[in-house]
Amino acid sequence: MKYFPLFAIILLCITGCNKHTTNQNPSLVHVFKGIAVVNTMGEIMGNWGTPDSDWETDVTWTSEEAALLNFPDTVSLAGTYIRDTTGWNTGTGIHEQPENAILVFPNPVAGYATLYFKGLGMVKFKATIVDKYFNRLMTFAAKSGMGEINLNLSDPAKFQNGVIYRLYYTLSATDSLNFYKGHGDILICREAVSNDCRQYVP
């Protein structure tokens, strides 16, 4: 993915550091098996391990996954819309469904990263970062056509070195709730050499 020029952005609500639960039940552990490696320009450079359709669109979510985006925010759907999507996934060209509309880069992350989204119109964007127990560690909500959110993942107590976390995201518009949804796995790695981070991927 190439670097995207950014236009005016209206971030109406960004809420960080919200823990949803403190679930530590080992029977509820979710295994994140790999990542899409992304450079500092937002270009996907390949995979480590077995990524699970990272940064694409998910057709279905479990009720547990859907509940992760069910947190209160003050961002309304007023004035939102989707650009023409006629013919998505019917071939190449202008109507091909866009890939990687949401992306975190770089990945692995040493401490700070950028959460990028392009709205496919004027949309409401929601996201949350969770651990393997599906505890919410950060939540975000915004309304824009395109934007960047700076992520501070440097707290070692919350984001542990060598651990993969997952970001779930949705895009919504008036009468089109969660029309675009997906997830991406993020590896926290504070090693001096990027390739040394491979050791943390199953």
Image (tube, helix red, strand yellow):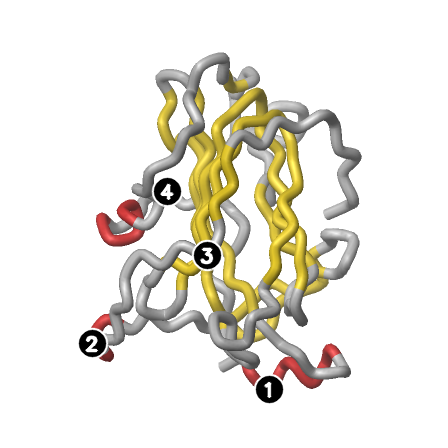
Write down the residue under mark 4: 59
Name the residue rendered at 23%, 71% in the picture. 28
The first of marks 3 and 2 along the sequence is 3
Q: Please, what is the three-letter code of the amino acid marked with disc 1?
A: Gln
Write down the residue under mark 3: 17
Write down the residue under mark 2: 27
Write down the residue under mark 1: 199
Secondary structure category for the residue under label 1? helix
Residue mark closest to the camera, 2 vs 4: 2
Specify whether 34 is left or right of 137.
right
The first of marks 3 and 4 along the sequence is 3
- Tell me the distance, in whole angstroms, between the alpha carbons under discs 4 and 1: 31 Å
62 or 145: nearer the eye?
145
Q: Label 1: how many residues lie within 10 Å, few (<14), some (14-19) or many (20+)?
A: few
Q: Is residue 5 above or below residue 123?
A: below
Mark 3 touches mark 4? (CB < 8 Å): no
Mark 4 touches mark 1? (CB < 8 Å): no
Q: Can you see residue 99?
A: no
